[in-house]
Amino acid sequence: MTAPTTESESPTPPEGRVGRTLRRQLERLPQYRRHAKHLRSLLAHSTWRKLANVALVESEWLRRRRVVRGRPYILFIDPTNVCNLKCPLCPTGTGDGGREAGMLSYECFTQIIDRFSEYAYEVNLYNWGEPLLNKDIFRMIAYTHHQNLMPAMSSNLNTVRPTDVENLARSPLEYLTVSIDGTTQDVYAHYRRQGNLELVLDNLRALIDLRRRLDRKTPFIEWQFIVMRHNAHQVDEARRLAAEIGVDLVRFIPVGLPFDAKDKGKLRREWYPELSDSSPSGAASQYQFLQRPSRSACFYLYRSITVNPDGRVSPCCIVYGEKNDFGHALTDSVDALWNNERYQSARSLFSRTGVPTAPTVCDRCHIFAHRANRPRPVPAAHTNGPPT
């Protein structure tokens, strides 16, 4: 059996610590980028119109344009913000999501897809909930595929109906991320609270076995492991177990904090691993462990659009809460939404000449470095809430 793709191995550091090899991997592997995945979608779903749009968007991103003529080509469409787990660094798990819990209907989903499919490549069917809880998830996957888009999904595989494993294996789903942050029940459930590791691994084995018997290569299966203080010592065992089960890729990513977490210092002390060497990193004050702010303009504001189960649009898949919304994917036209005042003001944070005109959640973002000495808009009580 071919071992899953991963980084080179090194001796396991003491519990709670990250060794040099894993540290280098986490430093150069931003949590929110999957270049190989994007390349797969580019090769499989290109048209001349889509390729021209990508070129235009990337050009405008590099030039930090405030008004974008291209259209978003990566879609995050959340089927539900309901979850069966209570993860302590997830606003859904802690009840701090700032949005009414609900399910995206199939009818609304198809309308959203139809608005963006002409230029888009990928549809990520997840964000703040467990997609398999939506009864229409496999219809959504099928419709995405029918519209020449790459369907991708992330799941904890704890809530699986008897038919779900077979449906996953037989569906046109192209990419599946399974979140497993430990190799023993106590370590796994320390973060994936109310989760059952044995059940997850059984479901994963059954899915890979059925995919093999069907002689299929999809869905491509990624085991995602968030490296935290309590599970860093299980990284090598996770590599071994992933190879035994037969996943296609095991991916270790740095832990991050909820965007609007109240006591970030306390959360860092509880969840960020220690470093086995004494070289400076600034990790103790970072929004994401070992991740310094990117010097580029925020690519979310150019490449992607994030739609919540209620149809409202967030500027990216990291922020949450209705108060941070930029518009509505069903009631606003694509042109009016994509270059409205909020989007233009947020992009101006990275521009050499643009000036923000409205307060947005992007003013508080530490993932991307804003231009120095950017003038800030004067907050107004009526502009900080959701658009009307």
Image (cartoon, grey):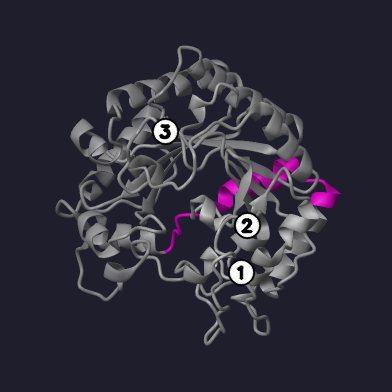
Q: Nearer the viewer, residue 192 or 310?
A: 310
Q: Are marks 2 and 1 in contact (CB under 8 Å)?
A: yes
Is residue 166 among the parts visible in the rendering?
A: yes
Question: Which residue in the structure is indicated by mark 2?
Answer: 326
Secondary structure under badge 2? loop
Which mark is drawn over residue 346?
1
Q: Residue furthest top?
A: 162
Residue 35 at x, y = what percent?
57, 53
Q: Main secondary structure of the magenta part?
A: helix
The answer to which image quadrant residue 236 occupies is top left
Residue 303 at x, y = what percent?
66, 57
Q: Amino acid at mark 1?
A: Ala
Residue 5 at x, y = what percent?
44, 44
Look at the image and tell me in which quarter the C terminus lies: bottom right
Alpha carbons under labels 2 and 3: distance apart = 24 Å
Residue 17 at x, y = what percent?
20, 57
Alpha carbons under labels 1 and 3: distance apart = 30 Å
* Sequence-first disc among 2 and 1: 2
Q: Residue furthest front?
A: 381
Nearest to viewer (mark 2 / mark 3): 2
